[in-house]
Image (spheres, grey):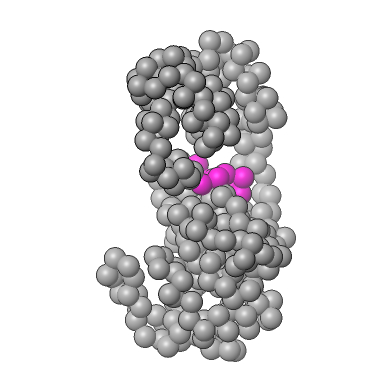
């Protein structure tokens, strides 16, 4: 899309596989590679694309090739579960990275990758390593790369072509579903949180929540303390503040309207709670976003030269 909008060949790419043969994706579609990878390959950046059953996809030829690319200081990236393959190749040692939320909890960092720090961000750019959680997050990663290399105006235009409301940045986290965090064995907790999420504008009281899920207030508080390390009231407040931040960054709603839509009785009360949680008031959050959009800020230490 960047090529199309500028009528220039800013980027080109090749699709590689171990042997140059087609690769079948988990949905049954076949990807036709350009060719097999070779030791003398030269790229501005290499992305490993992976999906389900990634542990079975760690081909030794691929791992060796990635290690060789790293020795040649080629920037490397991984999409969805691709970062797992990079970690298995040892090329994420000493780096921060992310991976799809379904796999974060299944990775034993201490025993498998003690020198790699996994986090739950949408994507992570750490020097010459680009890792992404998958889904639609690769679009945000690429828009940030385009912004760094070609300017924010082009990145914004590409985003508009994809009907993408907001270019998310390195500070945005992927939302890990509560069921994945606490497991299916806590139905009352999951039910209580679902009620909270459905009642943001007019928050329920703790007594109402306990009544609707048919447990006592004390049981409800114990569930939240045990599994989420916070009180139900605190968790509810954080949900409302996170929704408010989405409104601030993705809409033109006034701060008062955002406050009311998220269950706060007044703008000053909302601003105080927002400042306490995010360490800056909502007005400054919105100004900071506007400044970032106007400014062409680099997002990586390692620069790459577009074709």
Residue 192 colored in magenta in the image: no
Vertical placement of residue 146 versus 112, above or below:
above
Residue 173 colored in magenta in the image: yes
Is the magenta region chiefly helix, strand or loop?
A: loop
Q: Which residues are magenta?
A: 166-174
Q: Residue at x 48, y 52 (%)?
A: 101
Residue farthest along the left direction in this orientation: 28
Q: Is residue 159 visible?
A: yes
Vertical placement of residue 118 versus 210, above or below:
below
Vertical placement of residue 55 versus 195, above or below:
below
Q: In the rendering, at what x and y percent does residue 259 appear?
A: 53, 18
Q: Residue at x 48, y 81 (%)?
A: 59
Q: In the rendering, at what x and y percent does residue 169 appear?
A: 58, 47
Q: In the rendering, at what x and y percent does residue 277 appear?
A: 65, 28
Residue farthest along the top direction in this orientation: 265
Q: In the rendering, at what x and y percent does residue 96 appear?
A: 66, 58
């Amino acid at each position: 899309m960047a090529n199309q909008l500028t009528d220039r060949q800013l980027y080109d790419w090749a699709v590689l596989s171990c042997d140059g043969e087609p690769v079948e994706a988990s949905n049954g579609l076949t990807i036709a590679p350009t060719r097999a990878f070779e030791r003398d390959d030269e790229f501005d950046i290499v992305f490993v694309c992976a999906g389900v059953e990634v542990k079975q996809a760690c081909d030794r030829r691929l791992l060796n090739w990635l290690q060789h690319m790293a020795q040649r200081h080629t920037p490397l990236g991984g999409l969805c579960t691709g970062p797992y393959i990079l970690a298995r190749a040892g090329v994420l040692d000493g780096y921060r990275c992310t991976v799809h939320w379904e796999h974060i909890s299944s990775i034993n960092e201490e025993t498998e990758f003690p020198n790699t720090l996994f986090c739950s961000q949408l994507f992570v750019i750490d020097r010459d390593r680009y890792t992404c959680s998958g889904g639609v997050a690769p679009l945000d990663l690429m828009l940030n790369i385009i912004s760094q290399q070609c300017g924010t105006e082009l990145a914004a235009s590409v985003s508009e072509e994809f009907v993408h409301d907001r270019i998310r940045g390195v500070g945005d986290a992927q939302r890990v579903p509560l069921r994945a965090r606490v497991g299916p064995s806590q139905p009352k907790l999951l039910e209580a949180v679902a009620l909270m999420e459905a009642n943001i504008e007019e928050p329920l009281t703790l007594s109402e929540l306990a009544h609707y899920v048919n447990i006592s207030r004390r049981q409800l508080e114990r569930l939240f303390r045990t599994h989420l390390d916070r009180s139900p009231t605190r968790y509810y407040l954080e949900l409302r503040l996170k929704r408010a931040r989405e409104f601030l960054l993705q809409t033109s709603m006034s701060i008062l309207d955002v406050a009311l839509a998220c269950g706060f009785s007044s703008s000053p009360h909302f601003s105080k709670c927002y400042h306490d949680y995010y360490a800056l008031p909502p007005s400054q959050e919105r100004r900071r976003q506007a400044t970032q959009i106007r400014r062409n800020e680099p997002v990586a230490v390692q620069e790459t030269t577009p074709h």
